[in-house]
Amino acid sequence: MTGTTRIPAAEITGFKGWLIKRFARKTLGQVPTSIGVYWHNQKVLMDMARVGSRLKKWDACDEQLKSFAHMAVASRVGCTWCLDFNYFEAHNLDLDMTKAREIPRWRVSDVFTPLEREVLEYAEAMTETEPTVTDEMVASLRSRLGDSALVELTAVIAFANFTTRPNVALGIESDGFAAACGLKPLAQRAAVGS
């Protein structure tokens, strides 16, 4: 659950605030802490939300692969909010929840297909500073997914980095979305090299 954010959540006010809170409660069951933190700069909040909503309309790449890639970024960066929220979203999209739970420890788990493992490795490689993506990774995914899906997957991973890193920097942690719908806790991330 949420600890103390590094910037206290602002009071969400005005008609726009009322609409946002109403929408959040209707779709999520609560108003996420992150909205209050980002409310300090509503242009940033609205533009991040706008990009996220447009991203959901992309359909060249399999939804489960994109969801797992986003969760791999969240796990790698340490964004408990993003991991929790994406687990909740995966549940709502009826994705494979056994696999979703295992994302933090995908390297040692035996539930993933070879393609899913490639996608998870690619997501982590894009997330490293400096990125460690190789020609071989891209060539393999191109042959398995096609150019359009690979471009989409790459953009989803970039967006995941765009959203996870500020949340970690601002101290935004899990709001308990997965627990709110009775889902088991996520697996703990396995040590790299295990």
Image (cartoon, rainbow, N blue to C red):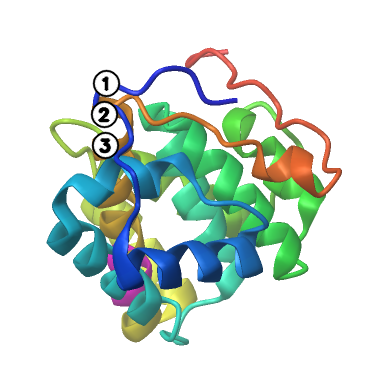
Q: Examine the residues drawn in magenta and state their main secondary structure.
A: helix
Q: Do tag 2 and tag 1 residues touch (Cβ < 8 Å)? A: yes
As drawn, 149 above or below 178: below
- The circle drawn on residue 165 is 3
Residue 47 x/y as whole percent: 20, 68
Q: Residues within 10 Å of mark 3 (few under 14, many from 20)?
A: some
Mark 3, secondary structure of its residue:
helix
Question: Does 7 lie within the magenta span?
Answer: no
Q: Residues within 10 Å of mark 1 (few under 14, many from 20)?
A: few
For marks 1 and 3, the one nearer the N-term is: 1
- Of the 4 image quadrants, the one containing the N terminus is top right
Image position of 164 (left or right of 169): right
Image position of 129 (left or right of 177): left
Q: CA distance from mark 2 to mark 3?
A: 9 Å
Mark 1, secondary structure of its residue:
loop
Tell me which residue sits at (53%, 71%) in the image.
Answer: 23
Depth check, mark 1 against mark 3: the one in front is 1
Which residue carries the number 2 mark? 170
Please, which residue is most extreme toward the front here? 14
As drawn, 168 above or below 72: above
* In the foreground, 176 or 192: 176
Which region shows up in magenta?
A: 151-155
Quarter holding residue 15: bottom left
* In the foreground, 170 or 13: 13
Quarter holding residue 24: bottom right
For marks 2 and 3, the one nearer the N-term is: 3
Task: Name the amino acid, label 3.
Answer: Arg
- Of the 4 image quadrants, the one containing the C terminus is top right
Task: Name the amino acid, label 2.
Answer: Leu
Q: CA distance from mark 2 to mark 1?
A: 5 Å
Task: Name the amino acid, label 1.
Answer: Arg
